[in-house]
Amino acid sequence: MAIWRIEWKASAAKELRHIDRQWIPRVLAAITALSSNPFPSSVKKLHGSDHTYRLRVNDYRIIYEVQQNRVTVEIVRIRHRKDVYK
């Protein structure tokens, strides 16, 4: 079983600072869990892209891309569900 490397886009790290403080530990725990399994049962693939997925943590969505040739998960966005797809 491979350990996947987690990479953050600078914009995603900045967005993390703007979410509600009570949800930050849960969001970080969900992202850490992606290093052992980037395709958990609760993940959904986004339409129109071959490598982009969405993970739900309460009202927040984590958008990430899986690069299988590099064994990397890149966190693209972390936002509230009402703003994430804009």
Image (cartoon, rainbow, N blue to C red):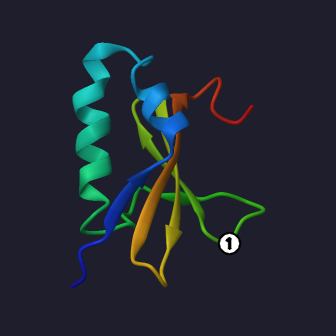
Q: Is residue 19 above or below residue 6?
A: above
Kindly identify the residue that appears in the image at 50 percent across and 68 percent down. 66
Question: Residue 11 falls in which quadrant of the image?
Answer: top right
Kindly identify the residue that appears in the image at 36 percent across and 63 percent down. 40
Question: Residue 70 falls in which quadrant of the image?
Answer: bottom left
Q: Is residue 19 above or below residue 8?
A: above
Q: Secondary structure at mark 1?
A: loop
Residue 31, horizontal then vertical, whole percent: 32, 49
Residue 76, horizontal then vertical, whole percent: 54, 47
* Left or right placement of residue 23 versus residue 1 in this view: right
* Left or right placement of residue 85 versus residue 23 in this view: right
Residue carrying label 1: 50
* Left or right placement of residue 85 versus residue 51 in this view: right
For the residue marked with disc 1, what is the amino acid?
Asp
Residue 37, horizontal then vertical, whole percent: 30, 69
Assign the N terminus to one quadrant of the image. Answer: bottom left
Tell me, yes or no, if residue 59 can be seen here: no
Using the image as rendered, state which of residue 33 and residue 76 is in the foreground.
Answer: 76
Q: Is residue 46 above or below residue 4?
A: above
Kindly identify the residue that appears in the image at 39 percent across and 77 percent down. 71
Assign the C terminus to one quadrant of the image. Answer: top right
Kindly identify the residue that appears in the image at 22 percent across and 30 percent down. 25
How many residues crowd mark 1 within 10 Å: few (<14), some (14–19), many (20+)?
Answer: few
Tell me, yes or no, if residue 86 can be seen here: yes
